Image (tube, grey):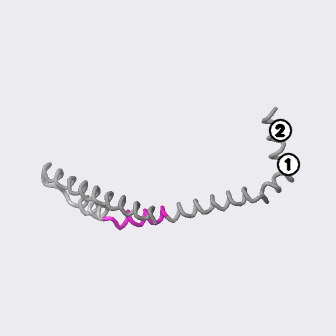
Amino acid sequence: MLSRMLFTLINNLRVVEKLAESRPIRRAAQLTAYAITKAQIAGRDASGRVMRSQTMRQVRDEAGKVPSDLGEVGIRLRRVKDTFVNEVKEGWKDGSRQIKK
């Protein structure tokens, strides 16, 4: 019964227009658009940082070289891991600073 009443109200053009003109609904739409825009900008910035990151550069360089033995592979992987961990820590600190602003 309740779902049928809600369905009828939602499909009523006048009710929808009145809701769309109300301040809370307009504000919710503005906040949603703002959040989506900020997320897109943050995603673009993050992807740019990944492409410029030392880890990506190092992985590309290491992938192009053929290792002579298994020990060398371990050393290369350890270097990539250390670089990655350092970049994650720096990114975490940068993110914390941006949140505080």
Is residue 85 inside the magenta stretch?
no
The one nearer the camera, 78 or 94, is 94
Q: Which quadrant of the view contains residue 32?
A: bottom right
Residue at 23% in and 56% down = 82
What kind of residue is marked 1?
Asn
Side of 41 relative to 28 (left or right) = left
- Which residue position is annotated with label 1? 12
- Where residue 14 sits in the image (x, y, percent)? 87, 53
Count of numbered marks: 2
Q: Residue furthest front?
A: 100
Q: Residues within 10 Å of mark 2 (few under 14, many from 20)?
A: few
Q: Is 60 or 40 nearer to us in this picture?
A: 40
- Mark 2 vs 1, N-terminal side: 2
Residue 6 in the image: state x and y as whole percent: 80, 40
Q: Which residues are magenta?
A: 42-53
Which disc number belongs to residue 5?
A: 2
Residue at horizontal 28 percent and vertical 55 percent from the top: 85
Residue 18 coordinates in the image, percent (x, y)? 82, 56
